[in-house]
Amino acid sequence: SQTIHQWPATLVQPVGSPLSLECTVEGTSNPNLYWYRQAAGRGLQLLFYSVGIGQISSEVPQNLSASRPQDRQFILSSKKLLLSDSGFYLCAWSADTPLGGGLAGYTFGSGTRLTVV
Amino acid sequence: RKEVEQDPGPFNVPEGATVAFNCTYSNSASQSFFWYRQDCRKEPKLLMSVYSSGNEDGRFTAQLNRASQYISLLIRDSKLSDSATYLCVVNKGFQKLVFGTGTRLLVSP
């Protein structure tokens, strides 16, 4: 069966520090991968998605970046965190179907709760 | 207009009650529709897909009205464990899902 792992679960970082969040998927190949952020009391905002190694689509211009160095690994990074980067970061995967990952539903990792202080 | 709109609630209902949530979406080209459930401080989890003909999963019934661009979720015989936020989700293009901000349900004894 497929599983998705995300770490760390919680993180407190000072303003201006770098960030690296990692997400890996097991039990499937060529998944579509996604990074979402959920600010306190807000909805889920799509940050990045990837349909293959090295292929990253950015949805919202900001000081975050994403990389996909391996088929089942998705990394979210920042060189300098801002207070506004605080939130609940969720990685998700969907199956690569001929009709597209958005048509199959996503499975989320357990998330990283980031507080920038 | 938001891509997916939901009443934020909260809906406060007693155990055993029937409750319905509605959702509207703006993109008439959307093809896939889902309801997700999110517990406090947890990740969203897929509750059910929504099919054109309507579908049922135990106490949960989902309906889709394409003409009105409207999705609904009906929960019968509410349980305490149904307390959560319910997210309406619609696809955008082939690769992306857009999430509503959610409707909060509180079931009380």
Image (cartoon, coloured by chain):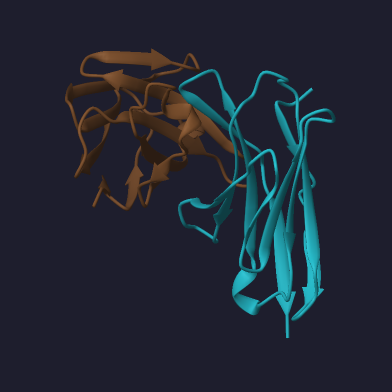
Image height of A67 relative to A34, above or below: above
Does A84 sit above or below residue A57?
below
> As drawn, is A87 to the left or to the right of B79?
left
Residue with the most extreme bottom position: B109
Measured as percent of width and height from the top left, residue A69 is found at: 16, 22
Left or right: residue B13 compared with residue B58: right
Q: Residue at x 48, y 36 (%)?
A: A37
Residue A36 horizontal/vertical position (percent): 45, 34
Seen from the viewer's position, the closer of residues A91 and A39 is: A91
Quadrant in which the C terminus of chain B appears: bottom right
Which quadrant of the figure has residue A104? top left
How many numbered callouts? 0
- Residues B95 and B42: in front is B95
User: Is there any visible trace of residue A20 in the rendered image?
Assistant: yes
Identity of the residue drawn at 48% across and 17% down: A59
The residue under the point 80% across, 70% down is B18
Q: Is residue B79 above or below residue B28?
A: below
| Chain given the colour cyan | B
Specify whether residue A117 is in view.
no
Which residue is situated farthest in the front direction here?
B53
Residue A11 horizontal/vertical position (percent): 33, 48
Q: Is residue A31 left or right of residue B101?
A: left
The residue located at (73%, 20%) in the rendering is: B28
Q: Is residue A41 above or below residue A104?
A: below
Residue B53: image x %, image y %? 70, 43
Residue located farthest toward the right when viewing the structure as drawn: B68
- Chain letter, colour brown: A
Q: Is residue A56 left or right of residue A105?
A: left
State the residue in front, A25 or A103. Answer: A103
User: Which part of the image, by quadrant, shows the N terminus of chain B?
Assistant: top right
